[in-house]
Structure formats: C-alpha cells, structure tokens
Amino acid sequence: MREVVVAGVGMCKFGRYPDKEYQDLGCEAVLHALAHADIKWKQIQAIFCANAYAGMGVGHNIAALIGNKGIPIVNVENACSGGGSALRLCYQSIAAGLYDVCLAIGVEKIPGGLLDDTSWLEYERDMGFNVQPANYALDVQRHMLEYGSTLEQVAMVTVKNRKNGVLNPYAGFQKEVTLEEVLTSRMISTPLRMLMCCANGDGAAAAVLCSADRLSSKAKKVTVAASVLTSEAYGNIRGGGSVKIHNPDRTERAAAQAYEAAGYGPEDMDVVEVYDTMASGEIINGEKLGLCKKGDYGPLLEQGTFDLGGNLPVNPSGGLMSRRHPLSATGLAQIAEIVWQLRGEAGSRQVDGAKIGMAHCLGTPGNASITILKR
C-alpha cells in the first residue's frame, strides 16, 4: 500500500443559502481545495462525492461546472459519514495504485426542521424512532444514570464549542453563549434543550488526496495514517441483540481499527474533532474513542482538558454546534480542520505543536467514520 497524503482542503462557510444551488457550494469548496493543494483540475483522476438530499448525479453536476473531464465520478450516500466515506474511497484508490490524485467532495442543502431520516423502516418512522433529538435524549439519560454525567456538563460542551466557533470563519454561528443561556433555552427532548442541539444547514467541503510523490511541496505534508469505516453490529443498543451480549458499538470498533492501522492510540492525539450533533454526543463519543475512561469526560471538561489550550483540544473548529450540520459535508469539514491544525494554518484557534489528529463522524442508521492524520 502506498503512502497517501492530503494535499489540500477547502470549504465554503456553512449557513443558509436560499439563493444558491448545491453545485455553487460544491464548486467553491473544490476550487479552494485545489488552490490549497497547488494541484490543477486537469490532474484530478477520480472524484468521490458524498450527498444525501440532492438526488442523482451530484458529483457529476459539480464537476460539469468546473469542466467535464471524462474521469470516473462516484456518488456516495452514507448520511453524515458520507464525507469521511468519500475520503476513504480516495485513500484506498491511491494506496492501491489505481490513481495518483483523487478528489473527495461533501455537499448538502437541507431544509429546516428535523432531518428527514428515511433510514429507519417505515413502521419505525411511524412510531417516531427516527427523531434524532429523542434518540440522543435517551442515550444521555442512560449515561447520566450509569456514569453520573450532568446536564451542566452537557451544556458546557455547547459553551466550549460556540466559543471556539467564534474563531472559525467557516462556522455558521460565531457568537458565544453562556451556560445559563444553554440551560434555559427551549426544551427539545428531555433533557436536551435547543442550544444543546446542532442546527442543520447548507455547505460543502472538499479534499484533494494524492500519492506522496505528487505533492508540489513536502514542507507541510499531511499523511493519512488511518481511514476506517464501520457499521453497527449485533449486541449493542443500535445493532440490537440481547442483555447477555454486549459487543462494542460502531465508534468503539472504528476507533480500535483506526488506532491499530495508524500505530497510534488516543494518548497520542494532539487535536480531535468529535461528532457532536447533540452536545451530549461529544461526551459519549469522546469516551467511546478512548479519550478518557467512561464517566470521566464531564469532569475533565470541567477542568478545561478539552478546551483550546487544554491538554487535548476537542472540536477547535467549534464542532457541529457552531459550524452547523450539512450532513455529507460534515465529515470533510472535520478533516479540513485537522489538516489546517497539522499544517499550522488554523489561525487564532491553532493548537500549538499539533502533529497527530483525528476526525470522527457518525451516520444513520449505523456507521462510523474515523480518519487519523499525521505530520
């Protein structure tokens, strides 16, 4: 397997764009990524484009606006893990020697309100199983019962991430919130309140990957140490099972595979982007990633461990709580943040001395994407 590097990344500012089509957002992200990589459009040999809402031929339509080339274009639908899935396909294609330069795109325009999650069976949707805030509310209630986490700790995730988002020019929300504002915001699904739930949005992100010999400059080389994708398995809450069988869930399995592939563990990470579609998700997922023991994330959060300037900054981009959540663009936005951090290009939110970073994303109905990058 060949060494694969991320040559460049690009994004558009996440938000709401009623006057723009997804093609416009996708083109903006792609052109930024090409410029960042110092690679020409004509050098791209294959494209993998993630999208969930726009229908057929999304990658083809974006490429057509830049210039049709006759190259393979594969459209990927893997819900919120789509962007990480597209990057993984680029990684595998280059590592196997099929191509030397590939482009991953994640793009989305999403209507307001709850996600139209059609991944559940129809009778399950009729019963409300596909209401995301309700599912997360049950998860955090269980975590509170088993590990003693508190609602104040959940609110602290929002406060931390919204503070970080002020420093991110691509974030949809760039205003700090107080603990009181979070705890008194409108109830969505007990105990989760509005400011504990990320907002949907429109956006696009892209990454150019290539073999190491195709880099124009080795000065800021960022190597893909691991790119892992898992799905849910029998023996846990999401995968079903029984009270007697307790297998690791998708995030725990993905983390184990990623650490083994990379040769690094959670203790080696300098910066991490954790999927926080609900603020409670950062706590639960952070523990499943092995960033700390189960039940310890909240107390460590209170101590400032995961702040910018802490021992392990988590979501320096502001996470989904600040950035918004255009499903298929989210994973690549996380990866873009890690690339900028490792290249020392994150501006006022830069994590000093960052050399190894990880991006984690979940997708319905049960997949997890983890990417580990290193300088």
Image (cartoon, rainbow, N blue to C red):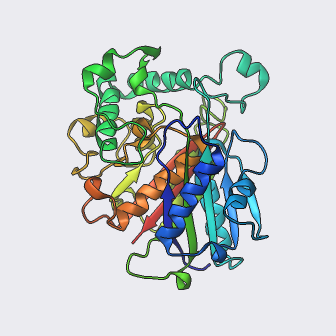
Q: Position of residue 238 (x, y in %)?
A: 62, 33
At horizontal 67% and vertical 32% (from top left) the residue drawn is 241
Camera-nearest residue between 268 and 133 = 133
Q: Quadrant of residue 301?
A: top left
Q: Position of residue 27 (x, y in %)?
A: 60, 56
Number of marks drawn: 0
Q: Quadrant of residue 151?
A: top left
Q: Position of residue 81 (x, y in %)?
A: 60, 47
At horizontal 51% and vertical 26% (from top left) the residue drawn is 136
Camera-nearest residue between 315 and 205 = 205
Q: Quadrant of the C terminus?
A: bottom left
Classify residue 49 as left or right of residue 196. right
- Evaluate whether residue 247 shows in this view: no
With respect to residue 350, does 36 lie above or below?
Answer: below
Q: Quadrant of residue 187?
A: top left
Classify residue 344 as left or right of residue 196. left
Q: Quadrant of the N terminus?
A: bottom right
- Evaluate whether residue 330 shows in this view: yes
At horizontal 61% and vertical 48% (from top left) the residue drawn is 107
At horizontal 36% and vertical 65% (from top left) the residue drawn is 342
With respect to residue 249, does 345 lie above or below?
Answer: below
Camera-nearest residue between 108 and 197 = 108
Classify residue 107 as left or right of residue 312. right
